[in-house]
Image (spheres, grey):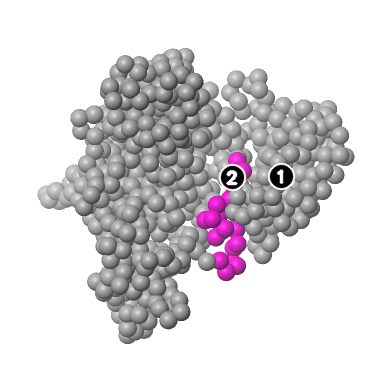
Amino acid sequence: MTRSAEDLLQELAAVDESHRIEAKRASQIDRSTMETVVAFSNEPGLGGGYLLLGVERDPDDLFGGSYRVVGVADPDKLQSDLASQCASMLNRPVRPRLSVETLRGKTVLVVFVPEAAAAEKPIYLSKLGLPRGAFRRVGSTDQEGSEDDLVALYAGQQVETFDGAVLHDTDLSDIDPAAVQEYRRLRQRANASAEELTWDDEALLRSLGALVRQGSELRPTVAGLLLFGTAQALRRCFPMMRIDYIRVPGRQWVEDPNHRFDTLEIRAPLLTAIRRAEGAVRDELMQSFSLPEGSLVREDEPALPLRVIREAIVNAVMHRSYRIHGAIQIIRYANRLEVRNPGHSIKAEEQLGEPGSQTRNPRIAAVLHEVNVAETKGSGIRAMRELMQAHDLLPPTFESSRRPDQFVATFLFHHFLEQDDLSWLRALTAESLSDEEARALVVVRELGAIDNAAYRNVNRTDTLNASVHLRRLRDLGLLVMKGSGSSTYYVPGANFERAPQTHQVQPQTHQVEPQTHQVEAQTHQPAAADLPENLKRRLPAPRSRPARDVLQQLLLDLCAWRPHSAGELAALLGRDRKHLVRELLSPMVAEGLLAYTIPAMERHPEQRYRTVAREQNP
């Protein structure tokens, strides 16, 4: 049954963003409308979505969360145009359900776009073709399709994945017999009677999809090289495919310019790399003291459960995009562990932790499963959440983003709720706080900000409930809302800042709303005189237009000297901030040349760009 316009408007008013509802002024059916139609048709498991035409976000609303009804002038023409474009502009006709209603005394159009059948996907704009024209619904936005999206959109249809591709200039000599033997050892431990253990190496590797026959030759696939490749082959074919374990003093990137970070680079076949990375994290993590009741013997345990560490590393290795030439980064801060891998989740963010797995690397996933390194049932994220909660730790947060194309898992070394937490929360407000709200406030204290997705992660709740609770904390003066729609996030408010800090960890953001704008304005006007002379000389002259590669190298060198915000870089280069982010900074992050100093929250008010450490020569 199609929902009413009044029902849709009430939900829009209740939430800051919605993945199933899109409001548009819609004086005509334009490309933006058709992109939303395609996204609703494509998104797996969404069940379709609603367009509410004749309604727009209220520009006069201070908090950016309300909508106003403007109506449509000619609903009959609008219906006809939409139906016509849905039949002619797409690779397959889409048949939306349309109804004209009266809302607040004005005429609006309710459009329900059903999800396409699996056999009909992907739906795409014919003019753009694949993959760009196959839009996906990500949060409240419509995102262009990518090669990796086709894995999800083609559903059960036979589609060759990247890990099954064969690279040029590779042959059987690129396979390391020692790596094959390691697989045999692990497989025998998992299942001593497995029949493939009796096969020779070539037959075994072909059965795993690690080798394919091309003419009279056997050639390794991408999966074969990553799982069993020699050191020379891995360096030649995948120069940036490694795991970096980075130890950062303090809670932020480069707090101390004299002691930035220590890095351990791990480059090896995947089974070996996983083991080394797990050992490095386990050995280096903070140790917590415990004295069990009735025992006189001290027990030391990592600040995170060992299985959580293992699951996080395996999840990054198994689900990362190997099309993107970048390293998996495991960053240990004083108060948290972050695991970042190239490539967004091809499973919808709201479905993370639910049964069922979607992977862009099925051959790699199958090998990891067969040696009991990984599950293939989508249980990894659920297990991490449950293990953290079982150890009285704050649940992890997971952020999947397409620009930059990455997935970030964040694990706080914080037990919830300790006595100093309770004392601190009582000092914040006389109002009673739910456990959900308390968790959110502790996250803000640890990370400096929170958004709807992070709230859903730590509290295992839905978008509507998260929005209601975040707005309540805003109304209590504990949080301040920034941005709007899908870009909404919250930072400490006036009452948050006035509360005594009983916990040893201080929040990253110390300014209430009026002061925050002043600080931002100041940091966006950096003094060029402070730059080293070699950088100062390279700053572009006013109204000049340096080549893209010149600007890119200058950005790398500026952010290698010290991290800069987008506003600071725009002021130094004499460029428009939004244009600089869209045309240079975001693409450089996606390419692994730059990285965020606070990767757990892209829109963090103290976000800066840093240059990714260049690979050292062996």
Q: Nearer the viewer, residue 304 or 121?
A: 121
User: Which residue is drawn at the image coordinates 27% and 56% (left, top)?
Assistant: 267
- Residue 17: give x, y in percent of width and height: 60, 36
Give the alpha-carbon distance from disc 1 to disc 2, as whole Å: 12 Å
Q: Nearer the viewer, residue 186 or 499?
A: 186
| Circle 2: residue type | Gln
- Quick check: 525 left or right of 32? left
Q: Mark 2 points at which residue?
A: 143
Q: Quadrant of residue 435?
A: top left
User: Which residue is drawn at the image coordinates 48% and 51% (left, top)?
Assistant: 345
Q: Name the mark on residue 34.
A: 1
User: Which residue is drawn at the image coordinates 57% and 29% (left, top)?
Assistant: 484
- Residue 322: give x, y in percent of width and height: 42, 56
Relative to 573, does residue 377 appear above or below in the rendering?
below
| SS of the residue under disc 2 | strand
Q: Can residue 477 be seen in this view?
A: no
Relative to 33, does residue 193 appear above or below in the rendering?
below
- Quick check: 164 left or right of 66? left
Q: Which residues make up the magenta segment? A: 141-159
Q: Does the magenta stretch include residue 148?
A: yes
Q: Of marks 1 and 2, which one's residue comes earlier in the chain?
A: 1
Q: Which of 6 and 178 is in front in this view?
A: 178
| SS of the residue under disc 1 | helix
- Residue 354: give x, y in percent of width and height: 50, 56
User: Which residue is drawn at the image coordinates 28% and 25% (left, top)?
Assistant: 534
Crowding near pointer 1: few (<14 within 10 Å), some, many (20+)? some
